[in-house]
Amino acid sequence: MAEAEMFPLRARGVSVSLGGHRALDDVSLEIGARARTAVLGANGAGKSVLLRVLHGLIAPDAGSVAWGESGRRPAQAMVFQRPVLLRRPALANIEYALAVNGVRGDERRDRALEAIGRVGLSHLAGRQARVLSGGEQQRLALARAWALRPQILFLDEPTASLDPNAAAEIERLIGGIHAAGTAIVFATHHLGLARRLADEVVFLEQGRVAERTETDRFFSSPASAEAQRYLQGELP
Amino acid sequence: MTVMKRLLLALLLLPPLAAAQPWITIASTTSTEQSGLFRAILPKFTAATGIEARVVALGTGQALDVGRRGDADVVFVHDRAAERKFVEEGFGVERIEVMYNDFVIVGPAADPAGARGRDVAQALVRIAQAGAPFVSRGDRSGTHAAELRFWAAAGIDAPQGDWYREAGAGMGPTLNVTAGMNAYTLTDRGTWLSFRNRAELVVLVEGDERLFNQYGVMLVNPQRHPHVKQAAGQAFIDWIVSPQGQAAIAAYRIDGHQLFFPNAAR
Amino acid sequence: MPEFPQDLWRIVALSLEVSLAATLIACALGLPLGALVAVGRFPGRRGVIIVLNALLGLPSVVVGLAVYLLLSRAGPLGELGILFTPAAIVIAQTLLVLPIVAALARQIVEDAWTDYREQLTSLGVSRARAVPTLLRDTRYSLLTVVLAGFGRAASEVGAVMIVGGNIDGVTRVMTTAIALETSKGDLPLALWLGAVLIGTVLAVNTAAYAIREWSLKRHG
C-alpha cells in the first residue's frame, strides 16, 4: 500500500471525555507521511490522549480519525513513557511482537536481531527484559516498535524517566528511525527534544489545539498567548 | 493438549486403578470396619480366593442405600428388619446370617441414673426418669434402629427432652460426644473396645439377650444391577459362612475379648 | 508418639497423588478460564465473576454428594464404574479447586491486564492472544493460586469421604484417615496424622516458594 493512500492522517473535530473530564475538545489536525511532529502543552493539556486517539487506543466520543484516501491504517507503533516489557528475554520481547503480527520463522529471528542491533543491545539479547536498566528498557521498547516497520511511530514522553545520557541515546535513535522513512509524532516536556527533533509543533491548551506552527517559528515567536506563557516557564 | 494427555496418563497410573487383581466392593458398617474385624479377616479371604475386598464403611441405612443404587456388590450390615425389606424389594438376592455381636450401654462411672444392671429396658427407663443426658446416633444406622427398639421395649415410644440428644453421626463420633458430655449411650461392643477416648465412661449394661446384634450378608441383585460382580461377590459370601471364614471371625480379639460370634446356619 | 499405621507412606503418597492430579487438572481448566473472564467482553461477565467468587465457599459435602449421585451406578456416569476409586476423589477435588483457581486467577490477570492493556493493544495483540501472554507473565503470582488450590485439595475431607468411601488401601487418604482415627477416639494418633498432613503440605509449599524465589531473581 503506497504511503500516499494512507497519509495524511486526519483528525476532524475529535472530542474525548475521560471520567467526566473533557480531555480533547474539537481537535482537528493533519499529519503527513514522514512528518516530525512534537505535541507540546502543560500537564493535563491532552497530549497523551491525543496520541492514543491517533494511534487507535482510545475511540473519540465525537469526530473522526481517518487515514489517507483509502482509510487503511498504515503499519504503526507506539512507545510509552514507561514501556511494558514481558517477563522474557530481551530478544524474545521483540520476537513476540513480530509473531503477533504474523512474522514467522527465520524472518522473525532476523528482524528481531536486526532491531536489537540497531539500538545497540545485541550483547543483552538473552538477558531478561525486566532486569535491564531504565534506558536499556526504553531502547528495547524502541527496537520492538521499530521491528514492526511502522510507517508512523507515536512516542509518549519517551525520555521523561531517563537520565540525560540515556535520553540523548533515545533521541539519537528516534532521529535515525525518522531518517529511515518513518513519520514520528511525540509528546514531550523536553523543549530541547522538540526543538531538535520536530519539524512542527502542535501546542495543546486544555484539550484544544492552541496553535500548530513550524518548530523554529514556534520557539522564536509563538502565535498564542498560552504558548508564550508556556515557553516563559510560567506554566508547569 | 500434551498437558492434558499427561494428566490422563497420570490418572490411569494411580496404583489402585492399575491393580490387575479382581475386586469387589462391600458396603458395610462402621462397627465392623472400625473394630478392626475387616483388617483381620479380609487378607485371609483374599489369600484364599485371589479376590480383593474393598470395604466402604457407613451406617446400615446408608450401606443399604449404596446397595440399592448398585454401588456395591455385597452388603454386610446389622438391621434384620431393614435387610428383609431390602431383599423383599428385590435389591438383595438372599439374606444370610453370619455372626452377632452385642450392644452395651455405656455411661458415667458414677452412674447418676442408677442404670447399671442386666436389663436394658429397665436401664433406659431409669435414664429417662432421671433425665440423665443420653446421646443417640440419630443417623438411621443399625445401632440407631436397635436403640429405638429398646426404647419401645422400655415403653418409651419417642424419647424427647433436653436430656435426649441426637448426634447424627457414626458410632465413633457419637462416643466422642458422649465422652465429652459424660452422658449415656448405646454402642456395639466392638467399637467400644477399640475406642480410645473413653474419658469417664464405663460399660453399665450388658448381657441382656435383647442386646444381641445379628449381622447379615446379601449379594446385590444382579438382575437389578447387571454390572454386579456376581461370582466374586458370591465367593465372599460363601467364604464368610464357611468354616474358615467363621473361624477367622471367632479368632479376632481385642485385649483378649472376642468381639464377634459366628453363627452362620451352614 | 503413637503407633502409625504401617501403610502410612501409602496414604501420604495417595493423598499427594490425587491432590496434585486434581490441582493440575483444575489449573489446566481454571487458569485459562479465569484469564478469559479477566480480559473478555461478553454479556453476563459481571454475573460470571460473582458466581465464581461465590463458588469459593462451595461446601465440599454438596460437591461430594453431587459427584456421588453422578458417578453412582444409578447415576448418569454410572457406566464408568469409578465411584469409590481414586479417580472419583480426583473429580470431586477438581470441582472444589476449580473455582478457587479461576476466581483468584481472574483477579490477578485482570490487574495485570490493566497494566499491559495499552502496550499489548498497541502491538496488535487480540484479547484472545492476550490470555496466554498474561498467564505467562503473571506466573509467579499464579503460583500462589496453584498452591492455594493444592491446599484445598489436600485438606479436603467431606467430599473425599463420600465419593472415595475411605476404603483401606484404596481410597484412604490423609484426611479420611484422620477422620477415621478421630471417630475411633484415638485422638493422639489423629493429631499426629494431622501433623504429617500439614508437614506434607508445608514441604510442597516450601519447594514451590524456593523455585519462585530462584526464578524471580533470574527473571526480574
Image: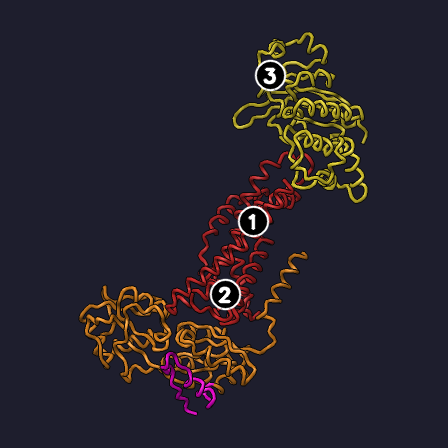
The relative height of residue A156 versus residue B165 in the rendered view (above or below) is above
Q: Which residue lies under the disc numbered 1? A: C209
Viewer can see residue A78: no
User: Who is closer to the viewer here, A64 or A159?
Assistant: A159
The relative height of residue C107 versus residue A233 in the rendered view (above or below) is below
Residue B183 in picture, x, y percent from top left? 26, 68
Same subunit, labels 2 and 1: the answer reads yes
Q: Which mark is residue A205?
A: 3
Name the colour assigned to chain B in the rendering: orange
Tag 1, which chain? C
Which of labels 3 and 1 is toward the front?
Answer: 1
Q: In terms of image quadrants, where is residue B129? A: bottom left
Q: CA distance from mark 3 to mark 1?
A: 51 Å
Q: Which residues are magenta?
A: B240-266
Residue at far top of view:
A221
Q: Secondary structure at mark 1?
A: helix
